[in-house]
Image (cartoon, coloured by chain):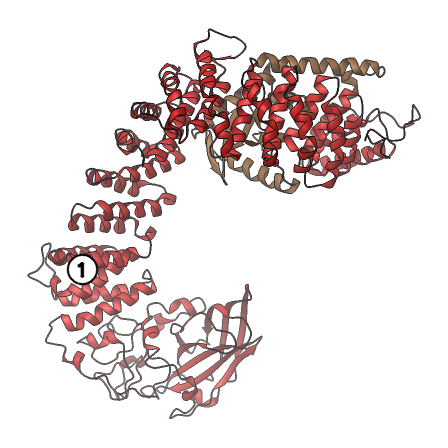
């Protein structure tokens, strides 16, 4: 199951998160993002969550004002990809407490950290929701503790 | 400088920074979002980037992570952030966890393996792989697994392999997925991971087991030997899968009542790989597959995801027929699911197996046909492809009915493929010739503009081979084109048939309504109409002419002896317009308009073939030009001022025959200069490689009438295309422009475009003309206006 990339974007086409699992230049990434965002935003609500784009399969789902969009390869299972997207949303929701787009905007680095505890190299690394959240929690704690060692600045103050 | 542990050592300054603390990340985000215009946003960002740059220059360690985080945000908005790349490396080298977190994140977003700078990461990665803190190790493994280059992977493979055996499951699972990436990048390294991987398949931790299964899948992809190596673990995998299904509720891994669907799907995937072309392995997994197929809950997407994977596995391995039927039935049920996503994957899968499991898929044919009207266009397309794949000898009539209906109503993007599909199916399975011809004709009638070019000769071949149906077919086709001549392929086929079997159209042979009056006349009228119609493509006109010529032998009208007479002598003096008869008739037409001589003059040029066929106008009447107004109409009234009495005109203008007849009487404007009246030619325009010459000839029948032949040539290196000319004359004149010989003026004077003009100068005024022409040259459109005032006096006197 090779997920090539995952994009999160708003209904206005603004990028909120981009995770690339294949090596591409900045220019190529921008081009792909632009085209794909356009394609997905043009879809009507009654259409299915899958579409063919170039030689990839695109799986997308809208949660409130955010589109979650994954590119998978031809032999991959679209239905389980929908479950992967859903699991990620659940993780964000648990972490932020009823997550909304603003949370992702203002705390994008945390969204990335959570994603990196759930997927690695485009594959699921942890199938237990609890374990992912626990890992994040502990990592956040480590950040907090280390910062205390380094001076007066707390984790929130550092960034 | 580089320290002895490979870190980048930078100068440290403690507390000497006099600058205020850099703006916080969230504060910057707020400020950027508050910008009301793009320009304002750009300004904010430029200011901030400048501050960040100087902060980097100052080597501010404390806030480096804050600055890089801000840079990452701005990069996501589309702004350049390359000046932060080295800073990411410094962050990674730092001992502070926050720094590492942001540093690695920045590296994954701002660096890519094509840049040399990313190699500087290798040492840091290596060190962090053996860090005392699991989260730091995790960061390193994650980054390597996401973006490690081949070189990096080679360098660090050993470390990763070690970590596969780490006592900490958190590390083991990440190491396994990092290993997946390493093998993808450097497949030759596969072997060193084999032993550790095998052990991982026994792991109790779901995350580790999942990663291990993914790792084995990746290994099997790269090497057939590993297939054999891991075939032995099939029973173990079967057991793991069984445990997942049979286990009680496990809150940690539960998704809507299903235990760890992600792991189930992965195991099924690995089983698929191992069971492919392996009888023994396939047999070992047969039962568990049947169990999953029958016991999995289908009310939610998650259950269907597992069923879908199961179906894919069953179809790929050497499963027994019962299991295959089970799989196809699952897909059949998917087709009826309310969830369009489920219907979509069902159609995709059914399409893949329609060859191998044809009968099983046939059972769901009616459901598939229903999907032709689905709301989603991807589903409709798949349904169409699947329908064509399901056509066979026994269902062809019914299926073609459905597909014809679909063709009538489907989106334009489908029409070509659908038409092709119908033709193919008809060819393979037509029960009889009549049905076959019917089917093709129906397609040509409804979707004629979307069919492939070779469908015309194919249909012609088919019709000609169906001897008993010639009458029926030609009548049908004739009826069709009486009604509509827009569908070119249909018209072409009809024209061919009428040419061949036109005699079968005559009275007495008609099944349908009898023709009124003279049937031959009507048939010819129809053909001429097609010939002249702007709807007709060049090929169609060629067919029409050929048909007309054939009919001249087939139709037995005794009133046209002239047809069989030899063609009149071709005169060189009859200059350019083979279109227009220059005749020797002495008669003058009343009203001073064009002469319409009564008989075929010896001096007449080669005439319009159509005129030869016409009784009432045996001589070349000067035809009405239906199409000409386009070239001059915008500037002047043209033909309205040059009316021909209807009875004279055969109503047959001959715009296109010029092309056919060009070969018979090549335009020879040069000879115009040698014409009896001897009016010298002029060069009306000569600029930028385009030269337009006028040559003149006065009408013998009407001294007020002047024929001007325009010859446009091109001395440049590139062709001039889309050449269109318009002309206007003063009010006392009347101008008529005939159709040009073409619209491309070839380069290097290798050819020319000629066009005939007729000017009526009843008041004998000095001739003046304004030209406007447009053409494309070197891919640029060019428009020119030119006045022509130096006409030779003989032209109007």
Look at 21% across and 83% down and name the residue there: B598
Badge 1 element = helix
Q: Residue furthest right?
A: B16
Task: Say left or right for B254 vs B22.
Answer: left
Q: Which residue is mark 1?
A: B464
Q: Residue B232 location in percent, x, y?
A: 47, 22
- Judge whether A144 appears above or below B183 on screen: above
Task: Identify the residue at horizontal 8%, vertical 60% (top origin).
Answer: B509
Count of numbered badges drawn on the protein: 1
Q: Nearer the viewer, residue B315 or A62?
A: B315
Classify 10 Å Cα crowding around label 1: few (below 14), some (14-19), many (20 and above). some
Which residue ends up furthest to the left in the rendered image? B508
Picture coordinates of residue A136, whole percent (x, y): 66, 16
Residue B660's spot in the image, x, y percent?
A: 32, 74
Front residue of this view, candidates A123 and B42: A123
For the C terminus of chain A, give its image quadrant.
Answer: top right
Question: Between B502 and B393, which is closer to the camera in this rendering?
Answer: B393
Chain containing the residue with disc 1: B
Chain corresponding to red in the figure: B
Q: Is residue B324 above or below residue B610?
A: above
Residue B501 shows in the view: yes
Residue B295 in which image quadrant: top left
The location of residue B5, given as percent across then percent down, is 82, 28
In the picture, measured across the screen, residue B66 lies left or right of residue B213, that is right
Closer-to-camera residue (B417/B157): B157
Q: Quadrant of residue B125?
A: top right
Chain A, colour shown: brown
Q: Is residue B35 visible?
A: no
- Left or right placement of residue B440 versus residue B147 in this view: left
Up/down of B320 relative to B154, above or below: above
């Amino acid at each position: 199951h090779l997920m090539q990339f995952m994009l999160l974007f708003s209904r206005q086409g603004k990028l909120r998160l981009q995770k690339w699992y294949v090596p591409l230049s900045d220019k190529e990434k921008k081009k792909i993002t632009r085209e794909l965002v356009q394609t997905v935003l043009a879809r009507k609500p009654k259409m299915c969550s899958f579409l063919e784009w170039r030689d990839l399969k695109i799986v997308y789902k809208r949660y409130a004002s955010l589109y979650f969009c994954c590119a998978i390869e031809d032999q991959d299972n679209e239905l389980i990809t929908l479950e992967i997207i859903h699991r990620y949303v659940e993780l964000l929701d648990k972490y932020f407490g009823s997550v909304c787009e603003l949370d992702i905007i203002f705390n994008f680095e945390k969204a990335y950290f959570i994603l990196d505890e759930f997927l690695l190299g485009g594959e699921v690394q942890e199938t237990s929701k609890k374990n992912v959240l626990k890992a994040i929690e502990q990592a956040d704690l480590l950040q907090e503790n280390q910062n205390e060692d380094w001076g007066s600045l707390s984790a929130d103050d550092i960034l | 400088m580089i320290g002895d542990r490979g870190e980048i050592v930078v100068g440290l300054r403690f507390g000497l920074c006099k600058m205020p603390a850099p703006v916080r990340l969230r504060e910057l985000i707020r400020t950027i979002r508050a910008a009301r215009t793009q320009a304002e946003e750009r300004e904010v960002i430029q200011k901030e980037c400048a501050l960040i740059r100087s902060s980097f220059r100052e080597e501010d360690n404390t806030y480096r992570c804050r600055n890089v985080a801000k840079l990452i945000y701005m990069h996501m908005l589309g702004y350049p952030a390359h000046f932060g790349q080295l800073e990411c490396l410094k962050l990674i080298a730092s001992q502070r966890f926050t720094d590492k977190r942001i540093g690695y994140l920045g590296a994954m977003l701002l660096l890519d393996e094509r840049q040399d700078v990313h190699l500087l990461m290798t040492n840091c990665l290596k060190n962090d792989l053996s860090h005392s803190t699991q989260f730091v190790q995790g960061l390193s493994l994650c980054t390597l697994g996401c973006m490690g280059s081949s070189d990096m992977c080679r360098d660090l493979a050993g470390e990763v392999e070690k970590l596969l055996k780490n006592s900490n499951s958190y590390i083991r699972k990440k190491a396994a997925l990092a290993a997946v990436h390493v093998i993808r990048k450097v497949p030759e390294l596969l072997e060193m991971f084999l032993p550790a991987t095998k052990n991982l398949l026994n792991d109790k931790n779901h995350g580790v087991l999942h990663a291990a299964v993914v790792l084995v899948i990746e290994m099997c992809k790269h090497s057939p030997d590993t297939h054999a190596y891991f075939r032995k673990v099939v029973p173990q995998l079967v057991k793991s899968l069984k445990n997942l299904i049979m286990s009680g509720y496990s809150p940690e891994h539960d998704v809507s009542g299903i235990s760890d669907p992600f792991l189930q799907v992965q195991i099924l995937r690995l089983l698929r790989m191992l069971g492919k072309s392996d009888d023994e392995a396939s047999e070992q997994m047969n039962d568990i597959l049947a169990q999953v197929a029958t016991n999995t809950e289908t009310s939610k997407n998650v259950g269907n995801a597992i069923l879908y994977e199961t179906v894919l596995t069953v179809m790929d391995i050497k499963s027994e027929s019962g299991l295959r039927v089970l799989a196809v039935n699952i897909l059949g049920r998917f087709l009826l699911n309310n969830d369009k996503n489920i219907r979509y994957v069902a159609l995709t899968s059914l399409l893949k197996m329609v060859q191998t499991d044809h009968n099983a898929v046939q059972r769901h044919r009616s459901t598939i046909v229903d999907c032709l009207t689905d709301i989603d266009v991807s589903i409709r397309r798949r349904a169409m492809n699947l329908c064509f794949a399901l056509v066979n000898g026994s269902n062809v009539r019914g299926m073609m009915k459905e597909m014809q209906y679909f063709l009538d109503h489907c989106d334009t993007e489908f029409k070509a493929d659908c038409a092709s599909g119908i033709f193919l199916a008809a060819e393979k399975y037509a029960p009889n010739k009549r049905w076959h011809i019917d089917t093709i004709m129906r397609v040509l009638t409804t979707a004629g503009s979307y069919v492939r070019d070779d469908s015309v000769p194919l249909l012609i071949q088919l019709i000609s081979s169906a001897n008993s149906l010639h009458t029926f077919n030609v009548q049908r086709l004739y009826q069709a084109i009486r009604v509509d001549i827009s569908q070119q392929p249909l018209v072409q086929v009809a024209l061919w048939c009428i040419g061949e079997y036109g005699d079968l159209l005559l009275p007495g042979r008609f099944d349908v309504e009898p023709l009124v009056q003279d049937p031959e006349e009507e048939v010819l009228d129809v053909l001429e109409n097609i010939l002249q119609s702007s709807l007709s493509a060049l090929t169609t006109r060629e067919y029409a002419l050929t048909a007309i010529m054939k009919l001249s032998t087939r139709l037995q009208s005794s009133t046209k002896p002239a047809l069989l007479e030899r063609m009149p002598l071709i005169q060189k003096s009859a200059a350019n317009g083979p279109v227009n008869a220059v005749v020797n008739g002495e008669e003058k037409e009343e009203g001073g308009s064009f002469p319409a001589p009564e008989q075929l003059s010896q001096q007449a040029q080669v005439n319009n073939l159509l005129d030869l066929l016409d009784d009432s106008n045996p001589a070349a009447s000067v035809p009405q030009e239906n199409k000409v107004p386009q070239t001059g109409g915008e500037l002047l009234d043209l033909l309205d001022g040059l009316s021909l009495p209807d009875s004279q005109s055969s109503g047959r203008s001959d715009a296109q025959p010029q092309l056919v007849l060009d070969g018979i009487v090549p335009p020879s404007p040069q000879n115009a200069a040698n014409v009896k009246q001897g009016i010298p030619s002029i060069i009306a325009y000569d600029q930028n490689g385009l030269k337009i010459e006028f040559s003149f000839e006065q009408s013998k029948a009407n001294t007020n009438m002047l024929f001007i032949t325009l010859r446009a040539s091109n001395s440049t290196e590139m062709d001039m295309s889309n050449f269109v000319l318009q002309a206007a004359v003063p009010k006392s004149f009347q101008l008529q422009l005939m159709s040009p010989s073409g619209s491309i003026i070839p380069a290097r004077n290798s050819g020319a475009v000629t066009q005939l003009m007729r000017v009526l100068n009843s008041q004998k005024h000095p001739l003046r003309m304004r030209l406007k022409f447009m053409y494309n040259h070197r891919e640029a459109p060019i428009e020119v206006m030119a006045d022509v005032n130096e006409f030779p006096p003989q032209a109007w006197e």
